[in-house]
Image (spheres, helix red, strand yellow):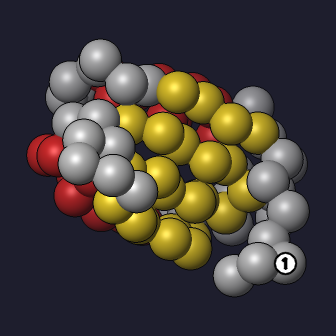
Amino acid sequence: MEDVRINKKINIKGLVCPYTFVKSKLAVEDMEIGEVLEILLDYEEAARSVPKSMEELGQKVLKVEKINDTDWVLLIRKDRS
């Protein structure tokens, strides 16, 4: 996982569903296929729902990791337009 190149980062801490998904989806839409988006969030439900929604849209979830008591980091690779 160390060799994954992050192309774009968004910090959506403080947001709750559905805004977490909307912000993530808009970020991915602006990217090229194969690029990787890093998402930082602090809403536990979004740590489950955003990856699920991204996979339903045909994107690849590379990582979902709780990095401290309150925050998660997600890595999403754009696999389709």
> In this figure, which residue is indicated by the disc labeled 1?
3
Q: Tell me residue 79's x, y (percent).
A: 69, 66
Quarter of the image where the N terminus is located: bottom right
Q: Tell me residue 32's x, y (percent).
A: 85, 48
Give above or below for 18 relative to 50. above
Q: How many marks?
A: 1
**Residue 43 appears in view:** yes
Q: Tell me residue 17's x, y (percent).
A: 19, 29
Residue depicted at 53% across the width and 27% down the height: 11
Is 68 placed left or right of 9 in the picture? left
Residue depicted at 29% across the width and 35% down the height: 42
> Going by the picture, which residue comes out furthest to the left?
45
The residue closer to the viewer here, 73 or 81, is 73
User: The disc labelled 1 sits on which kind of residue?
Assistant: Asp
Q: Tell me residue 36's x, y (percent).
A: 73, 56
Give above or below for 64 relative to 31. below
Residue depicted at 57% across the width and 60% down the height: 75
Is 71 placed left or right of 60 in the picture? left
The residue closer to the viewer here, 67 or 32, is 67
Within 10 Å of disc 1 (Cα), the crowding (few <14, some 14-19, many 20+) is few
Q: Quadrant of residue 12?
A: top left
Residue depicted at 84% across the width and 78% down the height: 3
Is 13 placed left or right of 9 in the picture? left
> Going by the picture, which residue comes out furthest to the front?
69
User: Dot 1 lies on which element?
Assistant: loop
Q: Quadrant of residue 52?
A: bottom left
**Residue 46 appears in view:** no
